[in-house]
Image: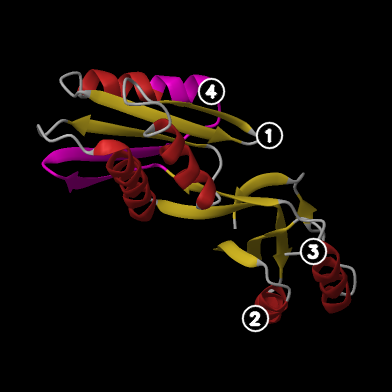
Amino acid sequence: MTESTSYYKTIEGRAIAEIEEKKSRFIGHITHVDTEEEALAFLNEIRTTHRMARHNVYAYVLRGGRVRYSDDGEPAKTAGMPTLEAIQHAGLVDVAVVVTRYFGGILLGTGGLVRAYTQATQAAIEAAQVVVVSRCVDIMLEVPYNLYEQVIRIAEGCEAKVRETDFGAEVMIGVRMLDGTQAPFLDKLTELTRGQAEPLVSDPFDAPF
């Protein structure tokens, strides 16, 4: 990563994992969210699905430092806070976690609850697909067939990822790279094609890279 490149870790889609502690079931649900409204909608969905559960504890972390959590009836700071801290320890943002507890009849105590909610959250995170989202640009260009392999080598040397190729009258190549690293790639293309290539560079956007 260059110093000018911003990036963050999040997850794609959803994941679920379950642990058991002294006959209580702790089901960790995790999902990617972009807004507080999406996080709360996810919470309500899990609450509806697990309406017979004793507790549906939640926490979410959004970019910009927005966080929220709830113990949902568990003793203060034994459930929501450990869930939140597990998310933060993993370095994730734009995620929501709901840990559903089905009580097994045995009291766990403060330490036991903290451990169980932490482990359920960690298990859900481990089950999820963690991705690094970076500021990227897409570049499209068309080159003659005899330059195709050289362009691919240049792209790889500039740490660009080839996303698509279309073999028509000429070869259409689409690459993605970190914003701020495209200048050397474009300079080498100009040199290779003697200025004949006319690459189209997208505006910067956030995407897994």
Q: How many marks?
A: 4
Q: Which mark sits nearer the N-terminus, 4 or 1?
A: 4
Q: Gap between marks 3 and 2, in whole Å? A: 21 Å
Q: Are marks 4 and 2 in contact (CB under 8 Å)?
A: no
Question: Relative to residue 95, is residue 203 drawn left or right?
Answer: right
Label 4: element kind: helix
Residue marked by disc 2: 149
Q: Gap between marks 2 and 1, in whole Å? A: 42 Å
Question: Relative to residue 197, is residue 122 drawn left or right?
Answer: left
Residue 36 circle label:
4
Residue marked by disc 1: 64
* Figure quadrant of residue 106: top left
Q: Which mark sits nearer the N-terminus, 3 or 1?
A: 1
Residue at x 54%, y 37% (from the top left corner) = 94
Q: Are marks 3 and 1 in contact (CB under 8 Å)?
A: no
What amino acid is at disc 3?
Thr
Residue marked by disc 3: 181
* Vertical position of residue 7 compared to residue 54: above or below: below
| The residue stretch that appears in magenta | 13-41
Observer-side mark, 4 or 2, equals: 4
Q: Is residue 168 something that shows in the picture? A: no
Label 3: element kind: loop
Rate crowding at label 1 as few (under 14), some (14 to 19) or many (20 or more) other CA atoms within 10 Å.
few
Rate crowding at label 3 as few (under 14), some (14 to 19) or many (20 or more) other CA atoms within 10 Å.
some
The verdict on residue 112 being magenta is no
Q: Gap between marks 4 and 1, in whole Å? A: 12 Å
Q: Quadrant of the N terminus?
A: bottom right
Residue 25 picture location, percent across and down: 17, 39
